[in-house]
Amino acid sequence: MTTSPVLPPLPTTVSITEVAVADDVALRVLRTGTGTPIVMLPGWTCSADFFVHQLTGLADRFDVIAVDPRGQGGSSRPLTGNTFTQRGHDLAALVDALDLDRFVLLGWSFGVLDALSYIRSHGTDRIERLVLVDETPKVPADPDDASEWGEAPLTHDGIVGLQRAVLDDRLGFWTAYAGYMIGDEDASSPDVARVVELGMQTPEHVAVATVMDGATSDYSSEATAASAAVPTLFLAREDWASDAGAWVAAKMPDAEFDTIPLHMGFATHPDAFNARVARFLA
């Protein structure tokens, strides 16, 4: 294991269990702390280990539960069912298995799609509060509509280029993106190496299936409805905060909006991130 200040090893206070959610599918779950449960969902190909600073920094006030989605980290890696629709059902089964009557739901990056997929199929009745971190609910953007905010435009250089990069050189793409996520241009740094190490645990078939699904997903109506039904905090990184803030103001007017410095601001600036989340949950 690569030693990284940004993503250090899990503390011994964190329990690691496997929870069955479907036939031949179990999810790896990290858990620590007491209080209101917070279920945390990581981004594309990432594992629950990315939330190590939340597992240490929020456990004094909350029951922090970080999950490896189907196909990622230490969870089962089936050949089929690697879609956000299915992962929303997996989350519902996990919530039942853990007997969580009410909980806070936090999704980061493509984990936002996991969270909104759960809401699409299972509603918000059990969600105490919702935290969406740095992902567009509608991933593909219409290049002819200036009001849209998306991960990438529906063009050859946008969504098509993203999918080709993953198909042609996933390691190269992920290494470059890891540096961008933490603001470190040195591909050989231990922090970049740790992000790459964790992200590349996900097998190729899962990575390809989920980037194809995620890059063509639109959960904007779920985001609008959820933010009207439960208290919602939307956090966006600073380099696209203007577009994100305008979109949230138009589509999620009841939500709180704030910024984080980088895509992985919860890991690079954990104290500020944890304080902002705790303030919202209070």
Image: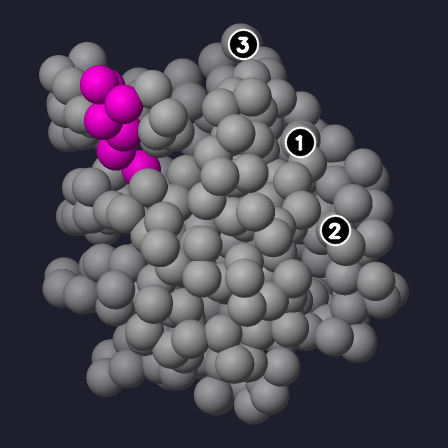
Is any atom of residue 105 visible in this view? Answer: no
Secondary structure state at the residue bearing disc 2: helix
Quadrant of residue 211 in the image? top left
Q: Say whether residue 140 is magenta.
A: yes
Which of discs 2 and 3 lies nearer the camera? The answer is: 2
Q: Nearer the viewer, residue 21 or 277?
A: 277
| Residue at left offset 67%, top offset 31% | 260
Q: Which residues are magenta?
A: 139-145
Inspect the image, locate mark 3, and give the three-letter code of the amino acid beneath it.
Asp
* Quarter containing the C terminus: bottom right
Inspect the image, locate mark 1, and give the three-letter code of the amino acid beneath it.
Thr
**Mark toward the start of the polypeptide (2 vs 3):** 3
Is any atom of residue 269 visible in this view? Answer: yes
| Residue at left offset 39%, top offset 82% | 93
| Residue at left offset 48%, top offset 88% | 97
Secondary structure state at the residue bearing disc 1: strand
* Quarter containing the N terminus: top right
Residue 205 image point, x, y percent: 16, 48
**Mark toward the start of the polypeptide (3 vs 1):** 3
Name the residue carrying label 3.
186
Quadrant of residue 104 in the image? bottom right
* Mark 1 crowdedness (10 Å alpha carbons): few <14, some 14-19, many ≥20: many
